[in-house]
Image (cartoon, grey):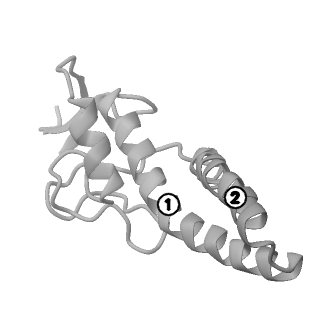
């Protein structure tokens, strides 16, 4: 049997796919886990066999995570400093801990959402479906 690439133009819903990716699930079925470890994406979904190796989520999730965490914690750091006037080393250590915790929480979720967006928009090879056809 040989694989034959069949392009399809059917719409894929973007919002449900991103929500599934945020939950670190397959953007197609929403049941299978997208990751095999903390940030390693599976080649295929174990439930629906959707190919996930096409993704191109290189540095984007890290940049978005830093952007979100920085924009959330910078004003909080200013407010905490003005309200409580803690020792600068204490303030730094507390907010470094908050930043690392928030970044570790957000990073796989943002990566899942970005991969799901690529899947929904049929980017980077997600736009074709494979079918098995007999060899001629």
Front residue (pair 97, 8):
97
Front residue (pair 39, 64):
64
* Residue 12 in picture, x, y percent from top left: 21, 28
Q: Is residue 98 above or below residue 10?
A: below
Q: Is residue 120 left or right of residue 75?
A: left
Q: Is residue 91 left or right of residue 123?
A: right
- Is the C-beta separation of discs 1 and 2 under 8 Å? no
Determine the image quadrant of residue 45: bottom left
Q: Mark 1 Cα within 10 Å, few/some/many (few <14, many 20+)? A: many
Can I make out residue 102 in this image?
A: yes
* Residue 104 in picture, x, y percent from top left: 55, 70
Residue situated furthest right in the rendering: 88
* Residue 2 in picture, x, y percent from top left: 23, 41
Residue at the (15%, 60%) spot, across then down: 31
Q: Earlier in the sequence, mark 1 or mark 2?
A: 2
Where does the N terminus fall, quadrant-wise? Answer: top left
Where does the C terminus fall, quadrant-wise? Answer: top left
Q: Which mark is residue 83?
A: none
Q: Is residue 32 above or below residue 50?
A: below
Front residue (pair 12, 130):
12
Residue at the (21%, 17%) spot, across then down: 9
Secondary element type, mark 2: helix
Q: Which mark is residue 106?
A: 1
Residue situated furthest front in the rendering: 83
Q: Mark 2 Cα within 10 Å, few/some/many (few <14, many 20+)? A: few
Mark nearest the camera among 1 and 2 is 2
The residue tagged 2 is 79
Can I make out residue 54 in this image?
A: no
* Residue 122 in picture, x, y percent from top left: 35, 28
């Amino acid at each position: 049997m040989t694989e034959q690439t069949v392009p399809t133009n059917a719409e894929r819903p973007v919002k449900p796919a991103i929500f599934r990716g945020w939950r670190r699930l397959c953007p197609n079925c929403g049941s299978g886990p997208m990751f095999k470890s903390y940030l390693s994406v599976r080649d295929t979904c174990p439930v629906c066999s959707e190919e996930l190796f096409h993704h191109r989520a290189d540095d984007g999730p890290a940049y978005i995570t830093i952007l979100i965490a920085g924009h959330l914690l910078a004003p909080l750091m200013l407010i905490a400093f003005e309200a409580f006037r803690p020792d600068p080393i204490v303030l730094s250590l507390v907010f470094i801990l908050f930043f690392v915790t928030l970044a570790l929480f957000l990073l796989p979720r943002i990566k899942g959402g970005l991969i799901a967006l690529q899947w929904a928009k049929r980017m980077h090879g997600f736009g074709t479906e494979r079918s098995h056809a007999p060899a001629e």
